[in-house]
Image (cartoon, helix red, strand yellow):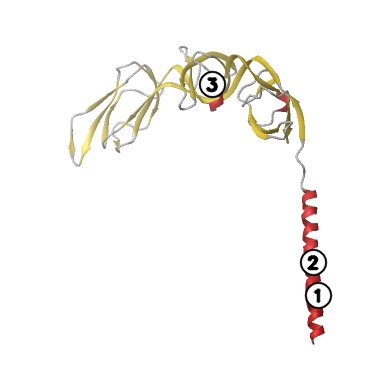
Amino acid sequence: MHLKIINIFFLLVLLFFLGCKKTEQNKAANKEDKPKSKLTEAEIFHETQEIYIPFHSDLRAGQVMEITVKQNSKLIALLVDTGDKVKKGDLVASLMKIKGNYEYTPIEIYTQFDGVVSQIQHHVGSIIPAGDRLMLIKDLSYMVANVVLKPEQMSLVKKHSKVVMQIQDKEITSSIDRIERKKNEIQIIVGNKERYLKEQKDIEGKILCGPIQGSYLLKKYVQGDSMQVQLAEGIKFYISFPAFTEDKALIYPPIPDQDHLLLIE
């Protein structure tokens, strides 16, 4: 009986060591199967280049007047139609406030600027609930594009920097009119006195930032907004590309003391 117990004990020990060995073999196999990162060596150029920041934005009317009803009201007069041009101070509608069965002094609505009636959402005689929009008036004599940039791009722009945009198959040149550095936002104004420009989504453009001294990488290596890289010393970190030239990308953060990078793919 005692010999039988000893045999069982040795059998359990043997199975334990065999199991550990198999686990180590599986770990080694998984490690070998895991694909290694590909390293590509690329040259860094330290120079001054004329750069631009590409962007996408929506093109909107310069001013918008949204006329909403503050209290339940009856529309008793409507003096414009959709598409009509209006001048600042024009009377466009009259409302009668309604509370129960009582009606009060009519409310006259005047325009705040020259523009075009874009929408009318109610007809004469209709009861308009409080908070509902009656009409929309837009000033199309100039258009506005608001562009949100990255913090590292904001340091490259200044007021009146030249901007080139592709709008309705035309190349339009303008400049930065306003900079909101706390919001990382710029505003571009495009003149439109002839009213040939229409509101549209996702226009493309470039902000021309002028000559900037920095570290540059050939554009052919750029993959996405950011990439992981490695220095010769083995240090790994991420870089981004806030601006471009025709064939190179500006590196952020700059790497002034290195001539080459290893790109991790």
Q: Secondary structure at mark 1?
A: helix
Identify which amino acid the numbered label 1 is placed on.
Answer: Phe
The residue lying at 64 percent from left, 21 percent from top is 244
Label placed on residue 155: 3
Contact (CB < 8 A) between labels 2 and 1? no
Mark 1 neighbour class, 10 Å CA radius: few under 14, some 14 to 19, many 20 or more: few
Which circle, 2 or 3, is nearer the viewer? Answer: 2
- Location of residue 111 in the rendering, given as x and y in whole percent from the top left corner: 32, 21
Q: 50 and 75: which one is in front?
A: 50
On the image, the x and y values in percent for residue 237 come to 65, 34
Side of 128 where 166 appears, left or right: right
Which structural element holds mark 3? loop
What label does residue 170 carry, if any? none
Of labels 3 and 1, earlier in sequence is 1
- Disc 2 secondary structure class: helix
Within 10 Å of disc 3 (Cα), the crowding (few <14, some 14-19, many 20+) is few
Q: What residue is rendered at 53% in x and 25% in y?
A: 57
Quarter residue 133 falls in:
top left
Placement of 185 over or under 158, stated as above or below: below
Q: State the residue position of label 2.
A: 17
Inter-mark Cα distance, 2 to 1: 11 Å
